[in-house]
Image: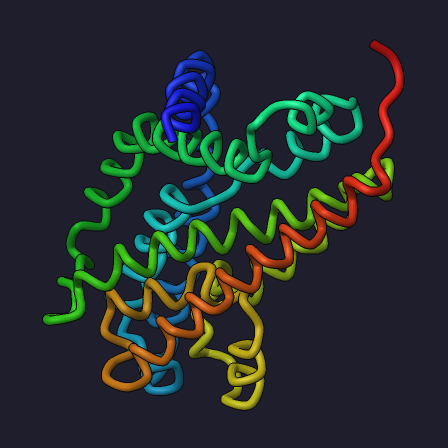
Amino acid sequence: MKKYLHVIGIGLQNNLQYRVNYLTRTLFSFIPLFAMVSLWRMIYAGNSGAGAHNGFSEAQIIFYYMLVAVVDVFTAVNEDDWQIAADIREGNISQFLLKPVDYLWYRLCLFISGRIAFISMACIPLGIFIFCFRGYFVAPAAGTAWLFPVSLVLTALLQFFISYAMAMLAFWLLEISTFIFILFAFEYLASGHLFPLDVLPPLLRDILFLTPFPYQLYFPISIYMGKVAGVDLWRGLLVQFLWVLLAYAFARFMWARGVKKYSAFGG
């Protein structure tokens, strides 16, 4: 355990060297959010019955995008999949086959350190973004607010394990950027980044909930906003936890199969 804590410490030092990059990335990431908020304001201004169709008032839909920003800051996988693929392609993982360090836990520690560094840089612009829309703030659902951070941790793990498994394709393919972009496109649409899943037809929404994507963003936000409660809430948390276990098992499987194919040359 001590060695992985050491990895987190080293990761923090390395990530904080790029704090200006983190700050710039955070500032520019809010531009699409401002655009979406402005778009929904126009939709509600031109259609007084919009909320009846999707179950969101104007204040709730804007607050939804505020929560999108918060969840992204805490859980998003930025460059971990690219770095893992580079380690495989360049032969850097050879050292992990010879030392008593589990590569998955090593990368998870780096992911955690990256999130800590990113949060420390993003808190100011995120705070400014929230302050600008403070009038739309909605208090968490009473009695279930403590489940939001639990779901947030599961969301982060789910995103990491899926990205890790995708990066394992580098054992078989020289370039995996196309697959990463395809996965990102599915996640962006099916997780609720672009719009709340409530706006979709019920059948399509139910189909999406058979995939892990809604549990990567929409579900924790739904907990905070009280859109899911009672039996549905606990069932959703169980399903999210099962998806984390499945993604972890799949990541382990991809590593085990990939290492058998892996070969490195040179010294």
The answer to whether residue 198 is seen in the rendering is yes
User: Which residue is pictured at 50% across the width and 62% down the height?
Assistant: 245
Q: Quadrant of the C terminus?
A: top right
- In this rendering, is residue 88 above or below 225? above
Q: Position of residue 37 (x, y in %)?
A: 38, 56
Residue 165 left/right relative to 126: right
- In this rendering, is residue 56 above or below 125? below
Q: Position of residue 110 (x, y in %)?
A: 48, 30
Q: Quadrant of the N terminus?
A: top left
Residue 137 left/right relative to 215: left
Residue 231 left/right relative to 37: left
User: Which residue is pictured at 83% across the width and 35% down the height?
Assistant: 262
- In this rendering, is residue 264 above or below 69? above
Q: Position of residue 146 (x, y in %)?
A: 17, 61
Closer to the camera in the image, 263 or 42? 263
Q: Quadrant of residue 118?
A: top left
User: Which residue is pictured at 78% across the width and 44% down the height?
Assistant: 258
- In this rendering, is residue 50 above or below 75? below
